[in-house]
Image (spheres, rainbow, N blue to C red):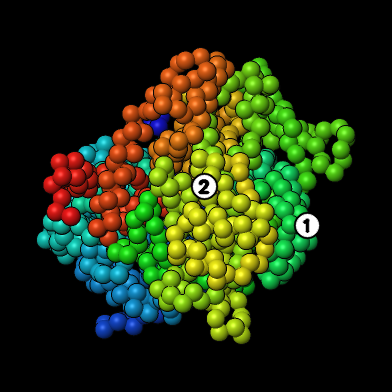
């Protein structure tokens, strides 16, 4: 088959040299299966660095052996129960040991392989009941297997084991996810792929499947039992999320595709990974496919804050070396060797954003939010980060539902939430230091830092439209010549102050279309110890956020706890908090003295925040920040004019109004999308920049529309547009929104619609806990914004607008 890739051909060559026995007997086939897995995976033998433990689970009828694979640096939030394939007749945990321990190692998750009894000695439903009994036991006793009480339990399996996993997801409560690897879901052989891949060259044939089912089931009625043939179930609602990993050239392919459609139709979250040009068995015989994962030599990342560090962690899988060029001395002793209390002390006593060497990210001292999806990404990459923050840095976890007062556009938003949202009380300065330590601990051998260095120019091959490296200069050697560094792939993570647009113009005469929105944003932030105000309802809220309501109220504030502290003062609330005031329309808060800030707050803010401020002891200087703008670079419009092997990521591609707290999560999602592109293993390195620009821009557009719809209401708004020809037009908000030459900028229809829709949606959400919850999922970037426009929600919003338009409201 011309579709076979090199790895599939290598696997088939192996089978040609080690053919199936002509006389297929059960014991002969069992020995053959163990032999080929032993031979083909020998490179992975004894590579597992964790612990392997053998146990048994006692059931009413027998004791079932299980093997527990616990990797180093294990994540205790998940556990996977694995069922091997082999047609319910052959194979065992031994035949899948290498792939299970390899997967456990890569995912940093405990995997448990189950040795269920096999046919023909123990026909259906005995082997399914074994699997059910073991799974139920592990769910009920999860902490005995090394995970937390709240850990998610998943089931996984290949081929026959995939069918068992799918069946258990119907039969048992408490399964949180399922991973079906070319699962045997169509045992009856009724889907088209049975005919398409009937030739023995595809290895698994209809005849072999019939042989398996004859030895595993008593009769056809057993096969038609919906517990065995899950496609025959009548309902699929409420099943756990499902990942399908499917071989493209496999008789079982269409059964998986059909089952995925049934789950999606029932509202079950699914993801399908269709592996092109491969046959059955590719997953459990991985060594033949190792060459399918490219390993490049050197990646260069410009900028070592959150986006740069997350990108480095993701790319470490594909590049032997990664160099991070960072403008500040972030590896100095102040950052790396200080205790958490010393770091806090430095943070509280800094005199300016540059006084302890973090001038490159001056906004790092302002209030920030790492949205839900962003922290999920960080936690998956750095499994120990959260525990260290809590146990070493005295960080507390807070409930957005119970510990916060969240006001959005004048509406109290978190009083009736249907889901809770966990928030970690931490300042960004400390989080960046903790994250850098974890990065160096986990990936230190691959990652080199060049600190106190400023990238000044790209090294390019204009004829090939390729970026080959970066010129940089060490900051402490003023006047020294520049240094060159070369790499296979270069990522600009320098943030909102990126020089990429200038470099691309100089090197390729390439003009990046941009839209800049200036809305007069500014912040003043300090750290303070909160004391009792005399209002218990106010003192009980650790987190207070009010985003203002442009243009009626252009000022907002945020109070977030960053440390728990020990104190003998009975009036102290026992927390240090970051307290910040933000504005648009250039209505900047004063930062010259706390007394003037109190006077300003008395004039502009509500009584509650004034009461808190009067009861707060200031523990740091007042730090201003006034350089925030919205800046969208439309890199996707340039297509293949964009240079190869070079991308902008996070704020370097698109920045937003900081009040929405999207920036870090936006960068993390970009980095994850880049990893997904590499994971697909089907793109040339020189094409990845174009693919990334298209996909990352879709992520940016989500955040951009959500942010700028509100920014367009700013009375003193200024918009600067640059097109691909370099023509620049500046528009200043006035009654006509005119440019200097008289041309007009119309507010985009989409922006007008979003302004209208968001206003009435928030009115509806003030009366609906579900809508409030959906909104927070979207702002946390864990859900697509379209969930806010589901048909029933859209009708609610329109109804709310209509009854107010025609004065039909009873209120």
Asked whether residue 590 appears in the rendered view, the answer is yes
Task: Give the vertical position of 273 relative to 466 (above or below).
Answer: below
Tell me the SS state at disc 2: strand
On the image, the x and y values in percent for residue 590 come to 61, 51
At x 45%, y 27%, the residue is: 734
Q: In the image shown, does 113 or 569 lie closer to the viewer?
A: 569
* Displayed quadrant of residue 198: top left
Task: Give the vertical position of 762 relative to 77 (above or below).
Answer: above
Task: Name the residue tied to disc 1.
Answer: 332
Q: Quadrant of the N terminus?
A: top left
- Between disc 1 and disc 2, the foreground one is 2
On the image, the x and y values in percent for residue 239 come to 25, 60
Mark 2: give few (<14), some (14-19) or many (20+) Cα within 10 Å: many
Q: Earlier in the sequence, mark 1 or mark 2?
A: 1
Q: Are marks 1 and 2 in contact (CB under 8 Å)?
A: no
Q: Quadrant of the C terminus?
A: bottom left
Asked whether residue 382 appears in the rendered view, the answer is no
Mark 1: give few (<14), some (14-19) or many (20+) Cα within 10 Å: few
Tell me the number on the disc at residue 583.
2
Q: In the visual, does 61 lie left or right of 3?
A: left
């Amino acid at each position: 088959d011309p579709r076979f890739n090199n790895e599939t051909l290598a696997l088939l060559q192996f089978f040609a040299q080690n053919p199936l026995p002509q006389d297929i007997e059960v014991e002969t086939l069992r020995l053959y299966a163990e032999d080929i897995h032993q031979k083909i995976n020998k490179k992975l033998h004894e590579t597992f660095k964790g612990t392997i433990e053998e146990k048994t689970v006692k059931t009413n009828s027998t004791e079932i052996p299980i093997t527990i694979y616990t990797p180093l640096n294990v994540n205790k939030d998940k556990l996977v129960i694995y069922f091997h394939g082999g047609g319910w007749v052959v194979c065992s945990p031994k035949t899948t040991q290498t792939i299970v321990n390899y997967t456990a190692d890569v995912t940093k998750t405990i995997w448990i392989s189950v040795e269920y009894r096999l046919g023909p000695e123990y026909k259906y439903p005995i082997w399914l009941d074994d699997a059910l009994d073991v799974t139920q036991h592990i769910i009920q006793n999860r902490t005995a297997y090394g995970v937390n009480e709240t850990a998610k339990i998943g089931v996984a399996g290949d081929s026959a084991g995939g069918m068992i996993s799918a069946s258990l997801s119907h039969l048992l409560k408490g399964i949180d996810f399922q991973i079906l690897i070319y699962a045997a879901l169509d045992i009856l052989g009724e889907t088209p792929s049975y005919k398409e891949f009937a030739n023995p060259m595809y290895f698994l044939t209809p005849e072999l499947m019939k042989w398996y089912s004859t030895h595993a089931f008593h009769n056809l009625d057993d096969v038609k039992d919906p517990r065995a043939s899950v496609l025959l179930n009548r309902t699929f609602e409420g099943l756990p999320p499902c990942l399908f990993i499917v071989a493209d050239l496999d008789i079982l392919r269409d059964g998986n595709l059909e089952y995925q459609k049934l789950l999606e139709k029932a509202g079950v979250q699914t993801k399908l990974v269709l592996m092109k040009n491969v046959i059955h068995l590719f997953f459990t015989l991985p060594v033949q496919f190792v060459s399918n994962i490219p390993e490049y030599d050197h990646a260069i990342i410009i900028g070592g804050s959150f986006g740069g560090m997350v990108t480095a962690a993701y790319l470490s899988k594909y590049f032997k070396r990664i160099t991070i060029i960072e403008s500040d001395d972030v590896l100095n002793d102040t950052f790396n060797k200080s205790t958490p209390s010393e770091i806090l002390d430095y943070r509280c006593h800094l005199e300016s954003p540059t006084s302890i060497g973090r001038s490159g990210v001056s906004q790092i001292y302002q209030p920030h939010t790492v949205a839900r999806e962003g922290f999920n990404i960080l936690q998956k990459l750095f499994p120990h980060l959260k525990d260290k923050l809590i146990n070493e840095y005295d960080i507390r976890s807070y409930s957005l539902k119970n510990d916060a007062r969240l006001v959005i556009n004048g509406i109290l938003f978190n009083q009736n939430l249907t889901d809770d949202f966990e928030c970690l009380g931490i300042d960004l300065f400390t989080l960046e230091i903790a994250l850098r330590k974890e990065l160096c601990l986990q990936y230190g051998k691959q990652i080199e830092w060049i600190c106190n260095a400023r990238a000044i120019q790209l090294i390019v091959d204009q004829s090939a439209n390729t970026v080959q490296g970066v010129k940089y200069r060490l900051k402490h050697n003023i006047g020294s010549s520049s240094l060159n560094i070369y790499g296979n792939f270069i990522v600009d993570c320098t943030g909102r102050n990126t020089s990429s647009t200038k470099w691309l113009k100089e090197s390729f005469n390439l003009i990046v279309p941009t839209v800049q929105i200036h809305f007069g944003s500014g912040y003043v932030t300090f750290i303070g110890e909160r004391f009792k105000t005399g209002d218990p309802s106010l003192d009980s809220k650790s987190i207070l956020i009010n985003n203002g309501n442009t243009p009626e109220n252009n000022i907002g504030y945020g109070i977030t706890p960053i440390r728990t502290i020990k104190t003998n003062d009975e009036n102290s609330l026992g927390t240090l908090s970051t307290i910040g005031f933000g504005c648009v329309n250039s209505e900047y808060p004063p930062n010259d003295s706390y007394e003037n800030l109190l006077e300003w707050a008395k004039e502009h803010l509500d009584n509650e925040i004034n009461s808190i401020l009067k009861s707060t002891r200031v523990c740091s200087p007042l730090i201003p920040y006034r350089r925030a703008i919205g800046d969208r670079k439309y890199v996707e419009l340039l297509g293949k004019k964009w240079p190869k092997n070079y991308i902008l990521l996070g704020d370097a591609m698109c920045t937003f109004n900081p009040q929405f707290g999207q920036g870090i999560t936006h960068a993390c999602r970009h980095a994850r999308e880049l990893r997904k592109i590499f994971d697909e293993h089907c793109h040339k390195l020189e094409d990845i920049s174009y693919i990334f620009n298209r996909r990352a821009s879709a992520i940016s557009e989500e955040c951009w529309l959500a942010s700028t719809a509100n920014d367009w209401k700013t009375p003193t708004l200024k918009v600067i547009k640059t097109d691909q020809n370099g023509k620049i037009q500046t528009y200043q908000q006035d009654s006509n929104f005119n440019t200097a030459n008289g041309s007009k900028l119309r507010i985009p229809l989409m922006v007008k619609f979003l302004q209208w829709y968001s206003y009435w949606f928030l009115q509806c959400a003030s009366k609906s806990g579900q809508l409030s919850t959906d909104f927070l999922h979207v702002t946390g970037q864990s859900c697509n914004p379209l969930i806010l426009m589901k048909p029933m929600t859209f009708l609610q919003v329109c109804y709310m607008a209509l009854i107010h338009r025609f004065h039909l409201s009873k209120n």
